[in-house]
Image: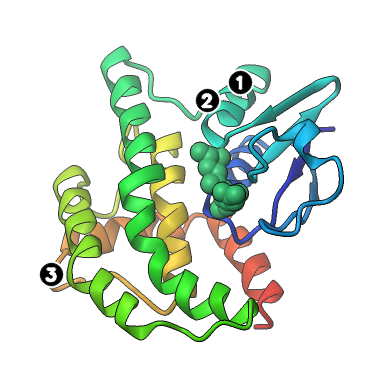
Amino acid sequence: MPKVYGVILSPYVRKVLLALEAKGVAYENEAVFPGALPEGYTDISPLGKIPALVDGDLKLSDSTVINEYIEERYPEPSLLPDAVDARAQARWLEEYADTAFLSALIVPFFQRVVAPMRGVETDEAAIAEAEAESIPAALDYLESMVNGAEFLFDGKLTIADIAIISPIINAHLGQYSIDASRWPNAAAYAEFIRSQDVVQKREAEERAMLGG
Ligand SMILES: N[C@@H](CCC(=O)N[C@@H](CS)C(=O)NCC(=O)O)C(=O)O
């Protein structure tokens, strides 16, 4: 059975867990926290990051690489669109979601959830700055890429939906939600993806971990 290392609140760990759960693959999880890595962890994850995955003799890190492996090892149901162009576009959206989009949307979560866990005061100015600059830029792009309350490709959940919703879930945990009057497509899209059973199950487990 594959084992995923990393705390379930991490957007990158969530990407991997959602992919496994969407495919119905049973897995184990060990809650590794950044900054408190267990001894020997870098044997599995040379950069010391989460997530990492061990499946038999295979040790992998990086959520995108791990999910590519999961797609090939456990092909059904596929989390890629059928057409070559759409596959390429889905991979691009995953890359965008993992980088600029995540960096922006993670700020309220980091400041309101992670900082207090570490005994650090929430920096409200950092949240205000993100809400004024980087988050609107990220959501403007999302607004231009989605079609409201539907999957991005082929009428089914794909890796693009999983990668995009993951930082949006962190934003919600950090008390930030998408303003539907400013970004109606993005807000409807996010609510649609969050309403999928596989995503609801993940969010319920995360809320339980945070005490409600
Ligand atoms: N590109 C990597 C990024 C993973 C990553 O940055 N994870 C964060 C936690 S959300 C981490 O482990 N940070 C600790 C560090 O950078 O040392 C992936 O997709 O898995």
Q: Secondary structure at mark 3?
A: loop
Q: Which residue is mark 2?
A: 78
- Please tell me which residue is depicted at 16% across the width and 64% down the height of the picture: 183
* Numbered circle sitting on residue 75: 1
* Residue 16, position as x, y percentages in the image: 61, 41
Most extreme residue toward the top, as rendered? Answer: 84
Label 3 neighbourhood size at 10 Å, few (<14), some (14-19), many (20+)?
Answer: few
Callout 2 touching callout 1 (CB < 8 Å): yes
Within-10-Å neighbours for mark 1: few <14, some 14–19, many 20+: few
Label number found at residue 114: none
Q: How far is the residue under mark 2 from the one under mark 3?
A: 33 Å
Disc 2 residue type (three-letter): Ser
Q: What is the quadrant of the N terminus in the image? A: top right
Residue 199 visible from this viewpoint: yes
Cα–Cα span, label 2 and label 1:
5 Å
Q: Position of residue 188 (x, y in %)?
A: 27, 61
For residue 14, say whether it is visible.
no
Pointer 3 residue? 182
Q: Position of residue 129 (x, y in %)?
A: 24, 74
Secondary-structure class at tag 1: loop
